[in-house]
Structures are given as structure tokens and as C-alpha cells.
């Protein structure tokens, strides 16, 4: 640390404060004292002048009342003698006006030409009314202060004239200036003595403060072992003891902070959500491993990089948007092969003053959630569409019947048949939806029994063969030995019904449906193949989705709901098996599914 300059030291500041205090005190005293002194001296001067003027007014009153013979002296000359006797060094001029505002005399030898003239001066006329006046003004040529007074001359309570007195005030202000000079000199001496005393007092205070400064430097270096020496029990001594107590608490706080930092680091490292922290300029200062993994960046690349740049948000948002409690942002990093969606919530780090000190961004992987939401939206849309179509058809035919078509023996049965067909279709759709709802519920349970699968499968196929309305040949390829499976007979019957129904729907006249049962060590595999139009390769992976149809128009025409294979998938997977399909467009489709075999139980049955 650089050595402290004198003019920045506390010695100088103490002396400066002392000097300023004395200066301010002396100035306040000086302003008050000199103001009062000036007022008092001016008033005393005016009183002394007025006492002399009162004597002059009495003599002028006698001269005005005096009776004169024709050859005697004139009133102007008598008044001139009185005025000349009155004038002294501090009197500039005295003018006497009669009760008609006419000048009867002046003491100025250079202004004798105004005698006998009337004056238009307003203050003279005002004084003739009995109201005297006075003022202080500057002399025009020398710019010196003058005291001007207008005194009425009365006789028997009647104003018979006015005395205008003009006196010099500079002598009074010269006395005030001498007193002010003495006061300034005293102030300077007091300030010098105060400065010396301030430096001496500062030295007694700065010694413990210097010790505390050195201790504070040690604290910045992390050394909490030293203590400040206490020189006394005054305020500075108490400050030193407080400083030592603060050092102890800082040591404890540092240990606590380090412990909390380690805990926070551990939490950030092991949490599954991504966390990014920035400074007030929006640059990354902390990022955990999940965030690095989500963004597919290295720590070196992300550190000190603007968060907007790191998240590719520069074109859409500014740093102010993030600081103003921006709502959650969704980033779509999906590719053609793999969906990948992130949700980012922003919050600001604020100081106690309310200013923003940084930003916290929390990243969530919502790919699966978005997928579920999309499937839910599609499911609702499909259900709405599937219900609206038969309802619209039924409404149209029922309106036609209500309008009189029921009387037509040729049309009415046809309309009723269509309405009945659509009603049955809606019932199948609702039943399928209820079935899916049960399969989706958490409390769904299978009622399993041991079934010899070959004979069970033959009975299902026989039922379809006896009721089919198409010229389709059934081909069966089963093993000779019995195969026992623990399964829910009703559910697997529904699976086979759905698959065989589809095979018959899409098989041409004269076609063939092949049923193949293969037994493996730990499972059986069922294959049902038709000679239909097949399924395009790009649609094959979607046929087990709810409401999915390759040819929607043809499927609705044939009465399908689009839920059969979806239900079959749910039931097979509930049994621990798998279901899939293979197809060549134009050459038919084969549906495969497996069911597990418990080998120990199988051995018991053999």
C-alpha cells in the first residue's frame, strides 16, 4: 500500500476541520457583531445629528417668526448665517424650505442660485404635511455614502418649513472597517493556533487507527489470528475492542460460508436440472454438469460467455428482458431423428438496494412431457373427430326421416340401417375408449388363468371362419405339442379379434390369411398374415398409435375406429409380451406378438 500523503492524512483533516469550525464560528460572530455595530454606530450618528438639527429648527422658527423693518436684513441672509454656523466637517449641505416649498437658504456656497426657487421634490412636500423622512444614498461624483434627512419645522403645531440635511457617513464606515480589520486579524491568529492544536489532537487519535488499518490489511489477506491493541477505554478503545470482536465473527462467518459453498457446489453438481448463473453483465460465472450436458458444450466454452449467446437467444431477447422477470423460454433442439426440447426459467439476483446483480437460469428437459402433451392433444382431436363423423351422419338421416322420409318404404329402411350402423360404430368407439382408459389406469389388473394356447387359438379362428362373408381362405400352422400360457383369456381373445378383423377387412376376395404359432424356450410367437394392400414403410411404425389409419376413408367405410391395434398393444405389453408388424406395400401385412412362458410350470404340464 502506498504511503499516505499529508494532505490526505487524518492529521490534515483534523486540523482542517478545527480551522473550518473556528472560521465558521468567527464568521457567524463577525456577521452578527459587525452588523449590530454598524447599526448602532449609524443610529448614534443619526441621533447626534438630529439633536443638532432640532436646535437649528428652533432657531429657524424664531427667524421665520421675527418681524423685520424694511431697511433691516432680509430673512434669506439671516437664515444663511444660521446655516453657516450649523455646518461642520461631517455636514455636506443644509437647505431650508418655507411652507410653500420655496428655498429660503442653503449652506452650500456653490448652490446659492436655488434660493427663492420652488422645489418639486416629493419628500419635501411630504414633510410639509408633517411626515418627516430619512434615507442613505450614494454621492454621485465620489460614490460615497450620504445620510439625507427631512425634518419639519413647526410653530404652534403648524409646519412652517422643512430642513433638508445631507451629511457624510464615510467616517462612520471607516471606523467600522478598522474594527473589521482587527476582527480578521484575531480570526487568523485563532485559526493558526487551532490548526496546531488539531494536529496534536489528531496524533493522539491516529495511532490506534493506524493499528486498526494494519489489522484490516491483514484481514484482507485472510489472517484472522491477530488482534488490535487497546490503548484506552474511550470511544477509540471501544472501537478497537469491537474490531477484535468483528475479526472473531468474520473468522466464524468465513468458515460457515466455506461450508455452505461446499454444500452448494455439491447440490449443483448432483441435481438433475441444469443451472446457470451470470454476473450483472449477463456473462456466465457458474454452470453445473447437467446444464453442460443439456447444451452439449464444454465448461471452458461456456464460462464468461454471454448467456444470450450460449442459449442462442440474441436475436429474440435482450439482457433487459431477462432482468425484467421474463417468462419461461422453450428451446427446441429437435432433429429429424430425435426430439429434444428444453424449458428455461429465469430469475434475477438482486441486492438489498433493489439493483440487479445477476441472473439465474434453470434448465429442464421437457422432451417427454411435450411428447405426452402432443399425444394428449392429438388424442382429444381424434376422439372429437371420430365422434363428430357418425353423429353428423345420424343427424342428417334422422332429420330426413323427421321431414317425412320415414313414409317412403324404399328409403326409410335404408336410412334406419345407416343410422343403426353409425350407432353401433359409436358404441364400438366408446367401448374401445373405455377399454383404453382401463388399461391406462394404475389399478388395472389382469385375471390370468392357465390356458392351452393352441386349442384356444383354433377356437378363435373357427369362430371367424364360420361367420366370415368373404371368399378368404384360412391357413393354420401350429405345433403338434400343447402350449400352456398363463394369460387373461378375455383380453387375448380381444387382441386376436382385433388383429383377425383387420386381416379380413383388408384381404381381397380369394385371398388368404395365414395363422402361424411358433414356440420358443421362453415365449410363444403368434403371426397373422394377410394378402392385403400392405402398409407403406414410413407408416409402419405408427399403426399401433391411437386413431392412426393409413387409409382413413377406407377404414371408416369398413367400420374401424383406429383403436384396435392400440388396444392390442396395451394388452400384450400388460402380459409382458411385445407386438410389431412387417409389411411390403402391395404384398400384405404380418402382425407379430409374443407372450412369455414360465418354463418351470411348462415342465409340470408336460
Image (spheres, rainbow, N blue to C red):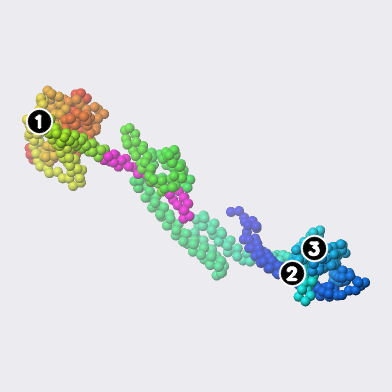
The N terminus sits in image quarter: bottom right
Q: Is residue 330 above or below residue 478?
A: below
Determine whether label 3 and label 1 are within 8 Å by CB. no
**In which quarter of the view is residue 552 placed?**
top left
Label 1 crowd bin: few (<14), some (14–19), many (20+), radius 10 Å: few
Query: Closer to us: mark 3 or mark 1?
Result: 3
Q: Residue at x 52, y 66 (%)?
A: 241
Q: Is residue 321 above or below residue 562?
A: below
Q: Residue at x 53, y 57 (%)?
A: 218
The disc at residue 129 is 2
Q: Is residue 440 above or below residue 88?
A: above
Q: Residue at x 46, y 44 (%)?
A: 319
Q: Can you give x and y, in whole percent of width and height, for residue 263 in the image? A: 38, 52
Residue under pointer 1: 409
Left or right, 558 with respect to 292, comes to left
Q: Earlier in the sequence, mark 3 or mark 1?
A: 3
The C terminus sits in image quarter: top left
Query: Closer to us: mark 2 or mark 1?
Result: 2
Q: Tell me which segment is drawn in magenta.
A: 348-377
What is the secondary structure assignment of the residue under circle 2? loop
Residue under pointer 3: 119
Amino acid at each position: 500500500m502506498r504511503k499516505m500523503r499529508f494532505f490526505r492524512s487524518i492529521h490534515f483533516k483534523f486540523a482542517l476541520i478545527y480551522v473550518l469550525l473556528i472560521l465558521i464560528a468567527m464568521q457567524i460572530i463577525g456577521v452578527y457583531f459587525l452588523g449590530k455595530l454598524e447599526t448602532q454606530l449609524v443610529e448614534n450618528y443619526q441621533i447626534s445629528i438630529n439633536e443638532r438639527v432640532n436646535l437649528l429648527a428652533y432657531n429657524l422658527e424664531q427667524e421665520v417668526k421675527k418681524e423685520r423693518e424694511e431697511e433691516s436684513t432680509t430673512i434669506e441672509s439671516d437664515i444663511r448665517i444660521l446655516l453657516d454656523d450649523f455646518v461642520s466637517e461631517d455636514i455636506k449641505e443644509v437647505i431650508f424650505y418655507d411652507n410653500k416649498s420655496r428655498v429660503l437658504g442653503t449652506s452650500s456656497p456653490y448652490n446659492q442660485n436655488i434660493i427663492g426657487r420652488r422645489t418639486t421634490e416629493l419628500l419635501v412636500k411630504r414633510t410639509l404635511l408633517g411626515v418627516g423622512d430619512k434615507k442613505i444614498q450614494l454621492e454621485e461624483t465620489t460614490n460615497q455614502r450620504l445620510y439625507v434627512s427631512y425634518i419639519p419645522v413647526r410653530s404652534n403645531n403648524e409646519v412652517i418649513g422643512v430642513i433638508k440635511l445631507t451629511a457624510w457617513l464615510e467616517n462612520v464606515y471607516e471606523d467600522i472597517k478598522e474594527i473589521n480589520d482587527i476582527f480578521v486579524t484575531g480570526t487568523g491568529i485563532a485559526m493558526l493556533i487551532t490548526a496546531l492544536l488539531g494536529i496534536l489532537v489528531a496524533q493522539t487519535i491516529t495511532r490506534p487507527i493506524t493499528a486498526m488499518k494494519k489489522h484490516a490489511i491483514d484481514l484482507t489477506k485472510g489472517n484472522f489470528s491477530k488482534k488490535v491493541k487497546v490503548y484506552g477505554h474511550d470511544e477509540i478503545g471501544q472501537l478497537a475492542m469491537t474490531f477484535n470482536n468483528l475479526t472473531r465473527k468474520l473468522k466464524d462467518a468465513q468458515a460457515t460460508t466455506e461450508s455452505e459453498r461446499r454444500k452448494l457446489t455439491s447440490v449443483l453438481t448432483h441435481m438433475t436440472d441444469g443451472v446457470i448463473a451470470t454476473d450483472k453483465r449477463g456473462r456466465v460465472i457458474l454452470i453445473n454438469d447437467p446444464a453442460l450436458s443439456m447444451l452439449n458444450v464444454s465448461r471452458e466454452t461456456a464460462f464468461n460467455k454471454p448467456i444470450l449467446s450460449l442459449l442462442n437467444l440474441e436475436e429474440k431477447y435482450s439482457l433487459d428482458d431477462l432482468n425484467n422477470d421474463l417468462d419461461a423460454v422453450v428451446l427446441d433442439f429437435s432433429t429429424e431423428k430425435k426430439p429434444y426440447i428444453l424449458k428455461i426459467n429465469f430469475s434475477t439476483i438482486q441486492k438489498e438496494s433493489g439493483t440487479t446483480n445477476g441472473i439465474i437460469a434453470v434448465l429442464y428437459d421437457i422432451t417427454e412431457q411435450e411428447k405426452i402433451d402432443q399425444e394428449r392433444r392429438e388424442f382429444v382431436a381424434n376422439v372429437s373427430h371420430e365422434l363428430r363423423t357418425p353423429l353428423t351422419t345420424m343427424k342428417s338421416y334422422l332429420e330426413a326421416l323427421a321431414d317425412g322420409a320415414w313414409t317412403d318404404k324404399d328409403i326409410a329402411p335404408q336410412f334406419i340401417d345407416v343410422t343403426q350402423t353409425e350407432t353401433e360404430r359409436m358404441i364400438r368407439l366408446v367401448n374401445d375408449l373405455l377399454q383404453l382408459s382401463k388399461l391406462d389406469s394404475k389399478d388395472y389388473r389382469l385375471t390370468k388363468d392357465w390356458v392351452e394356447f393352441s386349442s384356444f387359438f383354433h377356437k378363435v379362428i373357427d369362430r371367424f371362419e364360420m361367420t366370415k362373408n368373404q371368399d378368404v381362405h384360412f391357413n393354420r400352422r401350429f405345433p403338434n405339442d400343447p402350449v400352456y400360457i398363463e394369460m387373461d383369456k378375455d383380453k387375448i381373445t380381444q387382441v386376436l379379434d382385433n388383429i383377425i378383423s383387420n386381416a379380413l377387412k383388408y384381404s381381397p376376395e380369394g385371398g388368404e390369411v395365414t395363422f402361424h404359432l411358433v414356440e420358443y424356450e421362453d415365449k410363444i410367437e403368434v403371426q397373422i398374415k394377410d394378402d392385403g394392400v400392405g402398409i407403406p414403410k414410413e407408416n409402419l411404425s405408427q399403426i399401433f398409435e391411437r386413431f392412426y389409419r393409413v387409409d382413413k376413408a377406407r377404414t371408416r367405410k369398413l367400420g374401424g375406429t383406429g383403436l384396435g391395434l392400440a388396444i392390442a398393444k396395451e394388452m400384450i405389453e400388460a402380459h409382458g409380451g411385445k407386438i410389431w408388424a412387417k409389411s411390403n406395400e402391395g404384398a400384405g401385412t404380418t402382425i407379430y406378438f409374443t407372450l412369455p412362458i414360465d418354463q418351470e410350470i411348462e415342465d409340470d404340464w408336460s
